[in-house]
Amino acid sequence: MMSLCLTAGAAPPPVSYGVETDIYHPVRAEHGMVATVDALATQVGVDILKQGGNAVDAAVAVGYALAVTHPQAGNLGGGGFMLLRTKDGKTTAIDFREMAPEKASRDMFLDQQGNADSKKSLTSPLASGTPGTVAGFSLALEKYGTMPLNKVIQPAFKLAREGYIVNEALADDLKQYGSEVLPSHENSRAIFWKKDGSLLQKGDRLIQANLAKSLELIAENGPDAFYKGPIADQIAEEMAKSGGLISKADLANYKAVERKPISGEYRGYEVYSMPPPSSGGIHIVQILNILENFDLAKYGFGSADAMQLVAEAEKYAYADRSEYLGDPDFVKVPWQALTSKAYAKSLAEKIDVNKARPSSDIKPGRLAPYESNQTTHFSVVDKDGNAVAVTYTLNTNFGSGIVAGNTGILMNNQMDDFSAKPGVPNVYGLVGGDANAVGPHKRPLSSMSPTIVVKDGKTWLVTGSPGGSRIITTVLQMVINTIDFGMNVAEATNAPRFHHQWLLDELRVEKGFSPDTLKLLGEKGQKVVVKEAMGSTQSIMIAPDGKLYGASDPRTVEDLTEGY
Ligand code: GLY
């Protein structure tokens, strides 16, 4: 007999915005706020807000700036998602995910023996989908911004042309990841290696003259410069020369799409997040719906019982992800069933707070018939209360490592997010099936989850994170840490994280949980593994009086505190 602890409707603790006696303190502001992974890009966004731009203007400026200052994931050659909520309470999602080229085919990442070949999907010219970032930013700016494109691109152009001093985070990532993917490509070496043959170090100035030229072309001629003009020519030429598939027609046909966000309700809060082709929104809402059946607050943060319940809920969600999620323009994603309270209750009833269910015993559910820290996230709120959450990426750090011709633009390796072969894990260990098979013009399934939580009809929390498969659980923990455990936004950010994605059957935890807790989880049957940090959230919370509280994740190497 399982010992169920189902409770419904437990009152959440009082909301915390941070008081002097707290351990971690949010950044505070009155008018507007920008949270990004990079100090230069944050400043770009704040400057745009101070010049009278709204949150969308600032977000687009930040997105272009990060393509210069955070080349690990900031991009023009990749794609992503924007979730925005206007001051009038309209919530909408902009999908600028990459699309598979016309010539893409189901088995393109298999070797001659029929095995998935990750080199092809990660570091070859075949790894790139048709980029969406430039189209997505233009759609957002035209429909919801107030400033012209050339104005919001200007700061990025200046950073590329005049250069900036390489910080520790970039120097470390270039050494750790860049030196694996970049050096074999002449155009990439020319950017990140110095004339004496050594890699850029902290303190060196990085000037990107070619990228500055591309930014100037987009500023002058709009997205057509990228999709139909000189930049498109260079990308298509690079692909044709090196064996990639993206053609001029693929670029000319690319479209960013506005979609209806996934929404749910959790303990009285409204939760909005990204719909397919991201899996993030559906599974965050699904897991929250399951957890609503338990009194997490009673167990407390970091307790083995609370972690057990969350981990078990995550297993069911990731099992469903493997079966049902894909590009909604090609497959029917049963989002209503997956996010229904009734389905969540049926899953909650299978969860035992005392005993982990092995992943091998969990299969994707039967639904009702009606139907690396390698990414980057930023959040912006303006003085009127418009809120924007953007997660975009090249996929893994520095993408495929290929810079197209003399554009200075690094290309993504997002094709690895497709399921190369059913049941074979991708770089994040995620498995998939038919719904996420490679196909022409399809968008690969994502976990990116820009998320906005609404309290009493007002935007309350704007958040998101990089982290591949861990994005969903990282964002989930921002929601439960604030709502269930009453943490302020900085505490919720700093708290140690954990993650279960069904396959592998392991409960991955960060350092910081007590050995007793981990022992208890082991006794429940969880296979606990302590691994490196997960996620890098950038979050803003808005108090009912309009005051802003923000927190950037400390998990990324920072250069804000200097020493010598
Ligand atoms: N490339 C990681 C994701 O989209 O989830």
Image (cartoon, grey):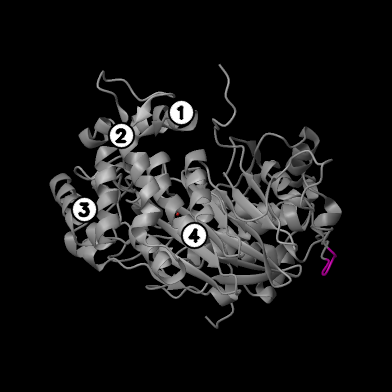
Q: Nearer the viewer, residue 545 or 369?
A: 545
Inter-mark Cα distance, 3 to 4: 28 Å
The quadrant of the image that shows the N terminus is: bottom right
Q: Is residue 11 above or below residue 465?
A: below
Q: Main secondary structure of the magenta part?
A: loop
Residue 156 percent across, percent down from the top left: 38, 46
Inter-mark Cα distance, 1 to 3: 30 Å
Q: Name the N-terminal-most of marks 3 and 4.
A: 4
Q: Which residues are magenta?
A: 7-11
Q: Are marks 2 and 1 in contact (CB under 8 Å)?
A: no
Name of the residue lying farthest toward the bottom: 370
Q: Label 4 amino acid? A: Gly
Name of the residue lying farthest toward the front: 51
Q: Label 1 amino acid? A: Asp
Name of the residue lying farthest toward the top: 564
Q: Quadrant of residue 203?
A: top left
Residue 136 percent across, percent down from the top left: 38, 63
Residue at image mark 3: 231
Residue at image mark 2: 182
Inter-mark Cα distance, 2 to 1: 14 Å
Inter-mark Cα distance, 3 to 2: 20 Å
